[in-house]
Image (cartoon, rainbow, N blue to C red):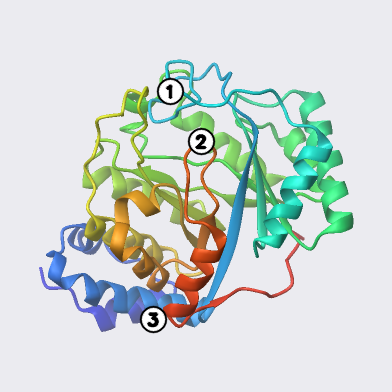
Amino acid sequence: MSLHWDSIARRALAGEAITRDEGREILRLPDEDVPSALWAAYAVRKAHFGKRVKICLLQNARSGLCPEDCHYCSQSSISSAAIDKYPLLSQEQLLEGARRAHQAGAKRYCMVTSGRGPSDEEIDHFCEVTQAIRQELPLEICVCLGLLTEPQARRLKAAGVGWVNHNLNTSERFYPEICTTHTYQDRLATIRHVRAAGLMTCSGGIVGMGEHDEDILDLAFAVRQERMDSIPINFLHPIKGTPMEGFQQLTPMKCLKVLCLFRLLNPTSDIRAAGGREVNLRSVQAMVLYAANSIFVEGYLTTPGQQAQEAMQMIQDMGFEVDTTEASVCA
């Protein structure tokens, strides 16, 4: 099958989905043809986001101590990874994290907790923290708290949270291979509760966990069907002490193909090059900007990442610009 990049870009710009066969061919492109895929992805990215790059920063609000068995995660119940473990951070600690995010040039600040899902008291805590941050700083607020009910999501929205992150992670078929303590459907239900509450959805996945290309395609079409507002694409960073510590399946070119696939299927969504970007894309990580309009800086909960100053230089060197538009609030 020969891909017609002009047609693919035009259809994506018109909101039409590429076919599954086309998506399969993108993932299987010869590496030397990746620039053609990046050209099509960039045409779509530029039409909707110009050359702007949104900077996001994660704050691990509670580390470790998690009852879930997600095989990729250093904080899970089956992990022996050497990580810091601590209970829920105080309001002042989370507010200080928001100040650091703002100083680093971040537009979005995402507070993340380990655990299955929040208690009502923890929802109260994040509502109070969000209100304090919103009074002081022009940041978009995202939380990632595990499985949520719709009433909990509504309380977060009323407090000023704009986005909730809850990744689908992989295909429904492959999900039991990476987690047994909750299901793909549990995650999908949380996304739908978030949407019903009027919050913006932030949900993507992790590639490189042993899934097949068909699983990546399932995930890409699922996030399109669910109309995800933000789509973080993580590339597995194998962590010693987790069941996936020996996995190293990705190449830089494969990562770029995945980003192109998600951009062409989700033209108006924020596509975020997320965890594992640095270790998997290595010397070509700047190329993610042709498909993704957003990146994380300063690390990923328990693993290090590109520092803000270096990321800013990369953005400038590539001819892009940091998104400094006024932080939006979920209506």
In-front residue for pair 61/21: 61
In-front residue for pair 39/172: 39
Relative to 151, does residue 117 appear above or below in the rendering?
A: above
Task: Give the CA distance from mark 1 to mark 3.
Answer: 41 Å
> For mark 2, does the 10 Å Cα neighbourhood hold few (<14), some (14 to 19), or many (20 or more) residues?
some
- Left or right, 111 with respect to 244, comes to right
Amino acid on which disc 3 is placed? Ala
Q: How many circles with numbers are drawn on the protein? A: 3
Contact, mark 1 vs mark 3 (Cβ under 8 Å): no
**At 82% across and 37% down in the image, what residue appears?**
91
Relative to 92, does residue 84 appear above or below in the rendering?
A: above
Q: Position of residue 325 (x, y in %)?
A: 69, 75
Q: Earlier in the sequence, mark 2 or mark 1?
A: 1
Task: Give the CA distance from mark 2 to mark 1.
Answer: 10 Å
* Residue beneath disc 1: 81
Q: Which mark is residue 302?
A: 2
Contact, mark 2 vs mark 1 (Cβ under 8 Å): yes
* Residue beneath disc 3: 43
Can residue 323 be spotted in the picture?
yes
User: In terms of secondary structure, where does tag 2 sit?
Assistant: loop
> For mark 1, does the 10 Å Cα neighbourhood hold few (<14), some (14 to 19), or many (20 or more) residues?
some
**At 74% across and 31% down in the image, what residue appears?**
89
